Amino acid sequence: MENIIESTDNKFVKEALQLRNAKRRRKLGKFVLEGAAYIADVADNTGVEYLLVAASQREAHRGLCEKYVHRIVADKLMGLVCDTVTPQGIVAVCRQPRPDSEALAGLGGLYLVCEDVRDPGNLGTIIRTAAAAGVSAVFALPGCVDAYSPKVVRASSGCVFAVHIVDNLDADEVMSLLSRQQARIYAAHLEGSTLPYDTDLCGNCAIIIGNEASGVSPALAGRCDAWLRLPMPGAVQSLNASVAAGIIIYESIRQRLVKTV
């Protein structure tokens, strides 16, 4: 019978609790992934360090316990570690993927740049959409919500492992990197005069998605090749940031698919 951890002084529980704080996540380079299905989807060569499993749920998660290093934790402690309202009794402490930004730039293709996207649901949904569409990288500029916060990870359905996320570069560094790739840069902008359907979104290009309330900043918008406007014939002035991102991303995918036929 495995020993059951019953104290928050335990080093594994203590670390998991520390990872609820964004500064500690960044310093340690780790985050917490909650939920059996998301943990099961993590590829074997990625960074699950260990699992914490509620004592009452050890049999339910036997398969994952056999796959990874794990510790059994008293149910009351798991309630402190978990962020969800109805926890499944299992979390993974993972290393944050840290892709080499220069190597990613060499991939070419479609890039996504998020500026000051603060809503966890928006950023998580954008990451999930980018992963599904095979986007080369998502650049989360300073001012965005932490890409590895529990709410973002949950909104992404665990897709933080399925797409390259770069969150340690500022706007100048990202724009310089994209410029060296000769990528065309487009902003999703309410004052845009160009529709994405009339724009060449193939080849190397980047889409900038701005803040939910104020959009792309004038400083960054001024450095773009064009501003893309989504048609809204209804009585609505703007779209949710993640919805706008999804529409433009998939227009790019549509064009690329047509081009290969």
Image (cartoon, rainbow, N blue to C red):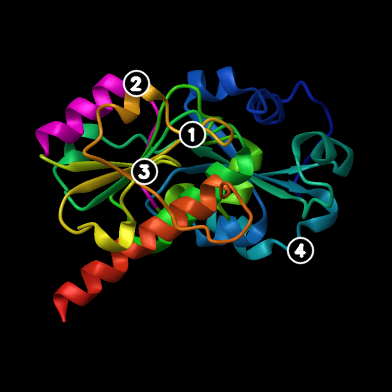
Residue 117 percent across, percent down from the top left: 52, 34
Of badges 4 and 1, the one in the foreground is 1
Return the mark for residue 86.
none
Q: Earlier in the sequence, mark 3 or mark 2?
A: 3
Q: Nearer the viewer, residue 91 or 254?
A: 254
Report crowding for label 4: few under 14, some 14 to 19, many 20 or more residues within 10 A (C-alpha).
Answer: few
Q: Amino acid at mark 1?
A: Gly
- Residue type at the position of mark 3: Gly
2 vs 4, front mark = 2
The image shows residue 130, relative to residue 93, as above or below, that is below
Identity of the residue drawn at 25% across and 34% down: 224
Residue name at image x 39 percent, y 38 percent: 97
SS for callout 2: helix
Give neighbour class at mark 1: few <14, some 14-19, many 20+ (Cα, 10 Å).
many
Residue type, mark 4 in image: Glu
Q: Is residue 177 magenta?
A: yes
Name which residue lies at 30% across and 37% down: 99
- Give SS at disc 4: loop
Q: Earlier in the sequence, mark 4 or mark 3?
A: 4
User: Which stretch appears magenta?
Assistant: 163-181
> Label 3 belongs to which residue?
192
Can the viewer see residue 185 in this picture?
A: yes
Q: Which corner quadrant of the image does residue 65 belong to?
A: bottom right
- Residue 132 in the image: state x and y as whole percent: 42, 62
Please report whichever mark, 4 or 1, sits nearer to the chain's N-terminal start.
4
The residue indicated by pointer 1 is 215
